[in-house]
Image (cartoon, rainbow, N blue to C red):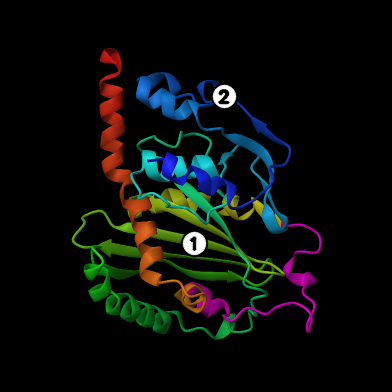
Amino acid sequence: MGKTVFWLSLAFAFSVGPAAAEKSSAFFKSYQQYNDAGKAFLDKIDPKTGAIDLAEGVHLDLKDKFYFLNKKDTAAVLTEAWGNPPGSGADALGMIFPAANDPIADNNWGIELRWEKIGYVDDSDANSIDYDELLRSMQADTSSANDQRVKDGFQPVTLVGWASPPVYDAVNKRLHWAKELEFGSDAVHTLNYDVRFLGREGVFVMSYIATVKQLPEIKQSLDEVLDLADFGAGKTYADFVPGVDTVAAVGVGGLIAGKLAAKAGFLIVALVALKKFGLILLVPLAGLWRFIRGNKSTS
């Protein structure tokens, strides 16, 4: 299944800076607990720590607390390991993971990285947003899309509420919020925790892939994650040139509500479905890797 998305790794160019790479067998302390199938998967990915330079002047400083997987490896994790449909993460620059866990660990979570070149986001609406009203509007939009979701073969979605209400840091031009979603009657709810870094030409996106049960751990990691990324010279929010640079069609409220996707011509339902598969299948896939570990002696 990973082969069907391998070519996508060539479609989005990014460069890797002076990062430190290491073989998975040495990098992951959990490596020896897997059988041949688990080891084979880890062997083909290439974790990197340290400094990572991405497209559009985005710079990551992961130090030794997180590791980075490139676009090809991200596709393998999302499809082969976590059970997503082929093509999942096609617009991702890569993913980062906490250094303590390998990407197929039962309790792991990851953060998908994307670049959205939508232009300069005017944040003048940030102080006037009624987040309760915005939530009600988002819940209505989610509910109204369910008929089409069911026709397309997906479960209906309920936006339960804010798992963490929106917070906008006007000084550092960073935005984060979390939604709690229920897919069908699934007992384990999905967590959509999103971080946005506003720049001169667009928005750098970090999207956590986790479950609601992992929310305390996610919140604990947030300060570190917010400090991982910045824009290079000439690409920062302050570098915007009025009358010259492109201005985005949405403000801060639109980013939270997902109006960006609608204005870009994408179906909100498709983006939510992608997140759902990546997130919720952390649970059944945990059982799969327990099976792999449990059969280690017979592999």
- The residue under the point 44% across, 37% down is 103
Q: Which is more N-terminal, label 2 or label 1? A: 2
Q: Residues within 10 Å of mark 2 (few under 14, many from 20)?
A: some
- The residue under the point 40% across, 81% down is 132
Q: Which of 64 and 83 is in front in this view?
A: 83
Q: Nearer the viewer, mark 1 or mark 2?
A: 2
Splitting the image into 4 quarters, where does residue 63 fall? top right
Image position, residue 150 (x, y; %): 22, 68
- The residue under the point 67% across, 80% down is 247
Q: Nearer the viewer, residue 200 or 62?
A: 200
Splitting the image into 4 quarters, where does residue 140 fall? bottom left
Instruction: Please give left or right for residue 8 compared with residue 17 in the image.
Output: left
Image position, residue 193 (x, y; %): 45, 60
Q: Distance between the residues labelled 1 and 2?
A: 30 Å
Q: In which quarter of the image is the N terminus?
A: top left
Q: Tell whether position 237 is magenta.
A: yes
Instruction: Please give left or right for residue 280 compared with residue 57 in the image.
Output: left
Q: Please say if 144 is above or below 231.
A: below
Q: Tell whether position 34 is magenta.
A: no
**Magenta-tinted stretch:** 231-256
For mark 1, give the secondary structure: strand
Q: Residue 194 carries which label?
A: 1
Q: Which mark is residue 232?
A: none
Q: Quick check: can you spot residue 134?
A: yes
| Residue at the limit of the structure toward the top, as seen here | 297
Splitting the image into 4 quarters, where does residue 164 fall? bottom left
Image position, residue 180 (x, y; %): 34, 64
For mark 2, give the secondary structure: loop
Q: Please say if 60 is above or below 247.
A: above
Q: How crowded is mark 1: few (under 14 residues within 10 Å), some or many (20 or more)?
A: some
Q: Residue 23 carries which label?
A: 2
Q: Please say if 218 is above or below 254.
A: above
